[in-house]
């Protein structure tokens, strides 16, 4: 199976915004200035100062939490890598927005027919084995497109060759179980405006690990909570009795 992805090298990005413009054109959006991710901006280049920039867009997780929480299967992880959304199935619950560890899906709050909007990694182009719009337009090669395994190999080569240039790891290699978007950062994730505490284990896997233990956990917690309730109720009862006795002793 060929899983495609993107590699973003922060040290190569000049903040030109060409990827933002290409993304807007590719998705038939009106040209506009991007100041954050929203329902009309799937890609945002953030200026961190000192000529350092970060791209914000869907990480297209290998085992996406948005897919696992969607009750109507409106989200799908395609065999090629992109995570896509089907408007005909969506019921607008917005669980995907709450579940995403990277806070990516956005909702059209002011639309009469609201949609969930996010980067789809140009699935229509990837399906034809073409690079994403953002990768094809990048003038410095800061964003490159290819097979995920090849991009990961290239990322580690750059890390090994110039360890002083980067923040020490490939962001996206392990986050949330791994993502189709990989990032080489010159600043650590927090300083780059990215979520820094994303678990390395697949989040759907963590969820099911807890759920499958519920039959064992519920009885134990039921006994514990029942005991705590009895103790609290007993304490209050004793306090009431002692208070009553003190009142009558004073009389």
Image (cartoon, rainbow, N blue to C red):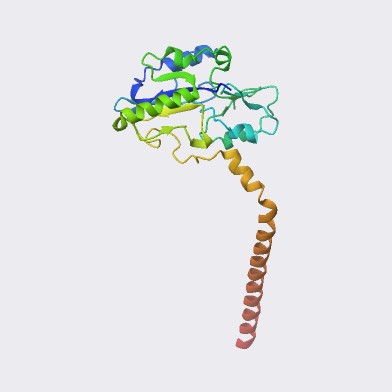
Q: Is residue 145 left or right of residue 240?
A: left
Report which quarter residue 217 is drawn in.
Answer: bottom right
How many callouts does the rendering have? 0
Q: Is residue 33 visible?
A: no
Residue 210 x/y as whole percent: 62, 48
Report which quarter residue 167 is drawn in.
Answer: top left
Residue 51 x/y as whole percent: 30, 25
* Residue drawn at 47 percent across, 13 percent down: 22
Residue 191 x/y as whole percent: 37, 35
* Residue drawn at 52 percent across, 36 percent down: 176
Q: Nearer the viewer, residue 34 or 133?
A: 133
**Relative height, residue 28 to residue 54 (above, below):** above
Residue 235 x/y as whole percent: 63, 73
Q: Is residue 122 visible?
A: yes
**Relative height, residue 25 to residue 222 (above, below):** above
Q: Is residue 149 left or right of residue 75?
A: left
Q: Nearer the viewer, residue 114 or 62?
A: 62
């Amino acid at each position: 199976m060929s899983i495609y992805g993107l590699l973003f090298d922060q040290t190569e990005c000049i903040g030109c915004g060409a990827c933002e413009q290409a993304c807007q054109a590719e998705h038939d959006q009106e040209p506009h200035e991007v100041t954050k991710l929203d329902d009309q901006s799937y890609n945002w280049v953030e200026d961190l100062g000192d000529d350092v920039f970060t791209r914000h867009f869907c990480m297209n997780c290998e085992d996406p939490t948005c897919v696992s929480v969607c009750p109507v299967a409106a989200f799908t992880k395609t065999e090629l890598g992109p995570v896509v959304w089907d408007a005909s199935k969506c019921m607008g619950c917005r669980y995907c927005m709450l579940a995403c560890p990277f806070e990516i899906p956005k909702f059209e709050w002011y639309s009469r027919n609201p949609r969930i909007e996010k980067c789809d990694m140009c699935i229509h182009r990837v399906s034809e084995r073409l690079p994403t719009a953002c990768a094809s337009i990048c003038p410095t090669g800061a964003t490159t497109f290819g097979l995920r395994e090849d991009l990961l190999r290239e990322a580690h080569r750059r890390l090994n060759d110039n360890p002083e240039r980067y923040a020490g790891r490939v962001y996206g290699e392990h986050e949330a179980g791994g993502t189709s978007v990989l990032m080489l950062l010159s600043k650590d994730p927090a300083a780059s405006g990215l979520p820094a505490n994303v678990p390395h284990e697949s989040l759907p896997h963590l969820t099911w690990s807890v759920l499958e233990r519920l039959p064992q956990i519920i009885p134990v917690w039921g006994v514990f909570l029942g005991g705590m309730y009895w103790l609290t109720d007993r304490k209050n009862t004793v306090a009431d009795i002692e208070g009553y006795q003190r009142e009558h002793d004073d009389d």
